[in-house]
Image (cartoon, coloured by chain):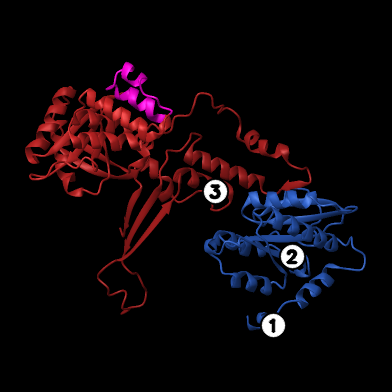
Amino acid sequence: MDETVAEFIKRTILKIPMNELTTILKAWDFLSENQLQTVNFRQRKESVVQHLIHLCEEKRASLNDAALLDIIYTQFHQHQKVWDVFQMTKGPGEDVDLFDMKQFKNSFKKILQRALKNVTVSFRETEENAVWIRIAWGTQYTKPNQYKPTYVVYYSQTPYAFKSSSTLRRNTPLLGQALTVASKHHQIVKMDLRSRYLDSLKAIVFKQYNQTFETHNSTTPLQERSLGLDINMDSRIIHENIVEKERVQRITQETFGDYPQPQLEFAQYKLETKFKSDLNGSILAEREEPLRCLIKFSSPHLLEALKSLAPAGIADAPLSPLLTCIPNKRKNYFKIRDK
Amino acid sequence: MSVLRPLDKLPSLNTATILLVGTEDALLQQLADSMLKEDCASELKVHLAKSLPLPSSVNRPRIDLIVFVVNLHSKYSLQNTEESLHHVDASFFLGKVCFLATGAGRESHCSIHRHTVVKLAHTYQSPLLYCDLEVEGFRATMAQRLVRMLQICAGHVPGVSALNLLSLLRSSEGPSLEDL
């Protein structure tokens, strides 16, 4: 086994928390049951890792096997990456072909290898007709850097792909091209949507976020639900604005629904506008360049936070449509310009 | 325009009613709970409202003290208070109104300058109290203070009226207010 491969496997296994180690190794399915049983997982981590590397050497692990382990680790730790969303379109008049996974994989790999001699491409198929692609980038003269790979999750029955943001941005056009051609599309466009939570991005992009759970009793009338809060209250406390509260609850429910919101960390608004003034000859009015402003809302769970603004009394209901349209428009980056 | 008047209803026997006006219901609820925990010879009633005017359809006892809760973290809260003040009759401001500013402890979250609420209270000739309502200990102390004030405003403390209390509180204000 190559020294670099051994080092790569070692570093990957070191990243895995002890309580996930057996699960991930089983998912990897490279070391046999017998081999795994010889490992004492209760030792200190360094010793466990040493033993595992030794077993991998025995089985002659290849770069491909190591890359597969890396994909599985990333699948378990999706939130460590920030994901962008890309949408592909077919050209006018093109037919919808039956998708052939094998042909896609071959084509994708070939395109990248033709352009950059040194590149490691690995695939792992998962449910829902999705394929996880791991690409380690090199150049014509340097070997691929295994520690800064890009991940792409492509849902073959849809024109959408999710890509992990990386610092090596110069390869993005090539990657887009490879994906488009291999999947028999015509064009690829980056959507204004980004988050750490792949599941939430999926829910937004595939419009699956508005499904209520079956156990939720949505037939309870609104009044009963809001007055349910009052059962514990002292009868000496009287709420004067019950009608107003109910109005806010109703509007919040109409806007956001009863279901849990998809998880996003931020929303960003870029405003560009020319200065408008009644006074003639003002210096700002003569300015050619528009005025720019950037507003960013951050939260561990932005949409839930927005949903609770009006009921908490921090904002008036209804909220600005710029905030409430986020899942509907599938965007969390907005550019607002003068009409 | 419906306006709250202090003396348009007859008082109930041994009852003192306070009206808390503020945008954040959770804070008002907590303050109300703290007040009701206090030992008090009078029967207390706490009314919570987001803003004024109050809905007219309700049969309501006479209100003895109005506390406007302003959250220094929220301009919306201040705006709501300013608009609600228009629905209070001038005679209420003879000791039966007070302002409570919360959130001063977290300086970095404050979007309203202290000066603004000080000026507001000065304009309406009413006392301004500071209390971080989110902190249990401070809230309990403030609740105690408000209960005592409420008893005086309801006339349950012999020899002290709301107006007396007001002038007592005003005389402790520093000379800096003269500059406003």
Letter of the chain that mark 2 sits on in the rendering: B
State whether residue A184 appears in this view.
no
Residue A159 vs residue A121, the one in the foreground: A121
User: Looking at the picture, how far across and down is residue B44, in whole percent?
Assistant: 82, 51
Is there one chain holding both mark 2 and mark 3? no
Q: Tell me which residue sits at (18%, 45%) in the image.
A: A172
Instruction: Please state, as top left, top right, bottom left or bottom right, where the N terminus of chain B lies in the image.
Output: bottom right
The span shown in magenta is: A20-42
Q: Main secondary structure of the magenta part?
A: helix
Task: Check disc 2 and report the residue beneath it.
Answer: B97
Residue A25 is one of the magenta-drawn residues: yes
Indicate the quadrant where residue B118 lies.
bottom right
Mark 1 or mark 2, which is nearer the start of the sequence?
Answer: 2
Task: Check disc 3 and report the residue beneath it.
Answer: A310
Tag 2: amino acid: Val
Tag 3: amino acid: Ala
Indicate the quadrant where residue A61 lies.
top left
Residue B167 vs residue A106, the one in the foreground: A106
Marks 2 and 3 sit apart, C-alpha to C-alpha, by 27 Å
Mark nearer the viewer, 2 or 1: 1
Q: Colour of chain B?
A: blue
Instruction: Please state, as top left, top right, bottom left or bottom right, where the C terminus of chain B lies in the image.
Output: bottom right
> SS of the residue at dot 1?
helix
Task: Check disc 1 and report the residue beneath it.
Answer: B175
Query: Label 2 crowding class (10 Å Cα cut-off): few <14, some 14-19, many 20+?
Result: many
